[in-house]
Amino acid sequence: MTTRAEQREQTRATLLRESRRLFADHGYAAVGLAEIVAAAGVTKGALYHHFAGKSELFQAVLEQVQQEVAERVVAAADARTEPWEQLVAGCQAFLTASTDPLLQRIMLVDGPAVLGWAQWRRLDRDNSARHLGEALTELVELGVIARQPVEPLTHLLSGAMNEAALWLAAAGGPGDLADTRAALARLLESLRAR
């Protein structure tokens, strides 16, 4: 027998899954609450039990997407043993993950527009940029990257990768990911201490 808490969690998970699918396929502006509750097979009351409205539901979906991207980045980095290779693999994994059509619209197009730039950046910082800062700190401490303040470097590199991801989402052609990955590799290589 399913408990009330389990039913609530199932309802929440269903709302997140179905709204995520709809937001990815159609975009935030084109999806209404009626469409979400119909796809989830719940009432509007059930939706409002879990979320204050569509924007709060979207924020929960965006957080889920950003956490998944961060997990991909960490997994790619953890598959390497050397700190430098971990940085490169993690950065490349971020670019690749951000070209996933099931994530792009939510994370890169609608995320900043719906939540506002400051809130979107906070979520990005809490998920991806934090890992980047930790990796850069380690590399500076090891002398692989010249000693310098890590915070500005983290923001510069994160901004470059986010801008590249936004560009790929908006106009990326068939060879653009490979070209962008190559440019990122050259950019990262330029950070190494000689």
Image (tube, helix red, strand yellow):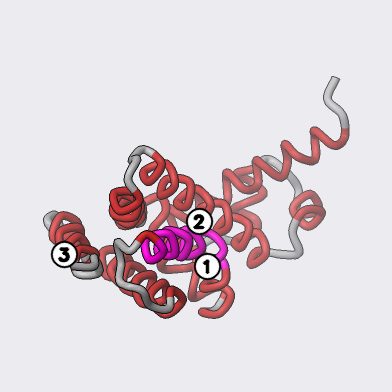
Residue matched to label 1: 125
> Tag 2: Cα neighbours inside 10 Å, few (<14), some, or many (≥20)?
many
> Tag 1: Cα neighbours inside 10 Å, few (<14), some, or many (≥20)?
some
Residue 191: image x %, image y %? 25, 69
Please, what is the three-letter code of the amino acid marked with disc 2? Answer: Gln
Q: Gap in Å between the C-alphas at discs 2 and 1?
A: 10 Å
Residue 161: image x %, image y %? 32, 67
Residue 152: image x %, image y %? 42, 80
Q: Gap in Å between the C-alphas at discs 1 and 3?
A: 24 Å
Q: Residue at the spot x=52%, y=67% of the render? A: 125
Residue matched to label 3: 186
Please, what is the three-letter code of the amino acid marked with disc 3? Answer: Arg
Which portion, as a residue range, is magenta? Answer: 123-141
* Mark in front: 2 vs 1: 1
Q: Earlier in the sequence, mark 2 or mark 3?
A: 2
SS at mark 3 in the image? helix
Residue matched to label 2: 66
Q: Is residue 100 visible?
A: no
Q: Earlier in the sequence, mark 1 or mark 3?
A: 1
